[in-house]
Amino acid sequence: MKIDPITLAVIRGSLEQIADEMDATLERMAFSPVISDGFDRASGIYDKTNGEVIMQGPRGLPSFIYVMEFTTRTVIESIEHIEPGDIYIVNDPYLGGTHLMDVKMVKPVFYKGKLTAFLANSGHWPDIGGRVPGGFSSKATEIYQEGLRLPPIRILDRGKLNREVLDIILHNVRVPDERQGDIIAQVTALNLGAERLIRLLDRYGEETVFDAIAELRARSEQLMRSHIETIPDGVYAFEDYIDSDGVEWKPLTIHMEMEVKGSDVHIDFSKSSPPCKGPLNSVLSTTIAGVYIGFKHIFPDVPINAGCFAPFSFNLPTTTFINAQLPRPVSGCASEVCQRIIDVVLGALSQAIPDKSYAAPMGTVTNLSVGGEDPEKGYYVFYSFIGGGYGGNYLTDGLINGNPTIALARTQALEIFESRYPVLFTRYTIREGSGGAGLRRGGLGVIFEFQIRRGEASASMLGERGRFAPFGILGGTSAKPARHTFFLQGEEYNPPHISKDEGIPMQAGDILRLETPGGGGYGNPIERPPELVLQDVKRGYYDRKTAEEEYGVLIVENDGAVDPEGTGQLRAALRTQQ
């Protein structure tokens, strides 16, 4: 059946609105700040036969664009009798998940007595049990140490709450009331989505809606293929590194070869490092999602549905740490390894299409969990992630304090942290000089510092880019790497793995300072216009000495005298002889 353009546009907008409304409902009802204020969540609509993504909310985490397709497919394959009113909960990374903290729920939608589609959502729970509060154990050597692992199981059975499953979950997490609130929010969002989808089917009829879905899929594939055809045929190789796995102090290599042939792309990761002991392994679905996010950065106009994935094929052997197998620990896969996959894709594409390329962004979310007992409010788990600089690119300088490249999620408001947990923020500022130099400079990271106000706590962190800084491209320089410091009873402590550690005891008055990376620079710094270098210095992005060394300029006062203290009225940036 041929769909007229207006009907197609209305149905597409309606499907997108359904997914977006599910996201909004989830974030407004969730008890966890990371969901309600940080937006670490996603919702979507999926095919009834193979779980392929039909539509995802425009504000949902990009890292879930493919992952929840795997999740839904696992439910289809695992549940013997799918019934109206069922909702399944699953967080197993090896059954279509990411890490254990990302808890998915899947709901079948029946229309006129027939299974018609699936709805799914995901929310990051600040705690899922395990050896450390928050689940980000940097020293875990098997997944069983990371928390409660759930295969697809009914949390609602034909519309009735499965209290036995709920009790198992709540008995294995540290703040059960908060987790119960998140469960209710996820269930409510799915039920609302089902109502809206049925209303759309009533309005246009099932045949018309699914003909439109098929047309949208075909158009998405066609658009992605047309973009790929602009990439010159050839094989492009790039590699980057994970600092360490948290257990052994040795880097992990992500080596990617990208073969472009016409409108097809084949991605080969077979030369990457083998599975590691620590939690920096990645599962198949998360690794593939990273590739798609990398391409979506370059071709953002391609609508998200199964069609945009069709041109890609993969060689991802289980002999690598980016297609790890049970029981390898994986808590760092979604937040850290996935971002490095994106970086590698951007690096390869900078060779293939330099006129549309991006230098590396910060490449880490610096997962931080602090668990303890507040004498005034009881037990708590405080989880946060932090932004950093984006890479300079063919159009602009890099974004300052951007959200992670895997997500539209953001650092939660400091006022929310301070009202809920016994912490006091003493510093949250741009990290000067952290961006790489270039024709387009890299964005700057941030300094995120807080103090424990009351009681005792245990801090754990799992981050990256402390050893291998975000790279520059086309002559741009690398950014500054991460640097994190604890001040414990007046003594300074720096984690041996720089951004990974666990179980660090903190008391009232202790301080943690996190310094996140900037983004890499794009293009030769000498080609940056002097007036822009001067502007950066005036804004405090670089000091004068750094600007003069990196960009080959001489910054002078109005009277022509160099001001060594940087306090005078700066007149201009004059290019020195090279």
Image (cartoon, rainbow, N blue to C red):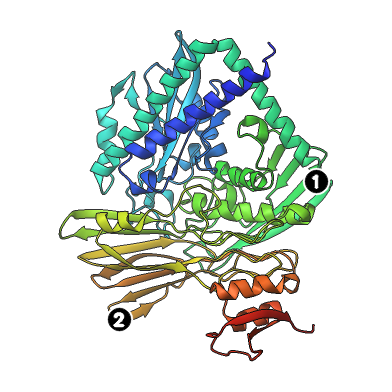
Which amino acid does the dot numbered 1 rest on? Answer: Ile
Q: Nearer the viewer, residue 274 or 297?
A: 297
The residue where tag 1 is placed is 231
The C terminus lies in which quarter of the figure? bottom right
Residue 404 image position (x, y, % from top left): 52, 53
Crowdedness of circle 1 by 10 Å Cα count: few (<14), some, many (20+)? some
Crowdedness of circle 2 by 10 Å Cα count: few (<14), some, many (20+)? few
Residue 452 visible? The answer is: yes
Q: Which mark is residue 440?
A: none
Q: Is residue 167 above or below residue 504?
A: above
Which amino acid does the dot numbered 2 rest on? Answer: Gly
- On the rendered structure, is 317 left or right of 485? right
Q: Nearer the viewer, residue 268 or 1?
A: 1
Sooner in the amino-acid sequence: mark 1 or mark 2: 1
Residue sitting at 66 percent across and 58 percent down?
396
Residue sitting at 69 percent across and 77 percent down?
551
Mark 1 vs mark 2, CA separation in Å: 55 Å
Residue sitting at 59 percent across and 50 percent down?
322
The N terminus lies in which quarter of the figure? top right
Residue 301 image position (x, y, % from top left): 66, 39
Q: Is residue 552 above or below residue 361?
A: below
Q: Which mark is residue 490?
A: 2
Residue sitting at 28 percent across and 38 percent down?
181
- Point out the residue furthest to the left here: 376
Q: Secondary structure at mark 2?
A: loop
Residue 344 image position (x, y, % from top left): 66, 55
Residue 103, image quadrant: top left
- On the rendered structure, is 158 left or right of 67? left
Q: Secondary structure at mark 1?
A: loop
- Point out the residue furthest to the top here: 112
Residue 75 visible? The answer is: no
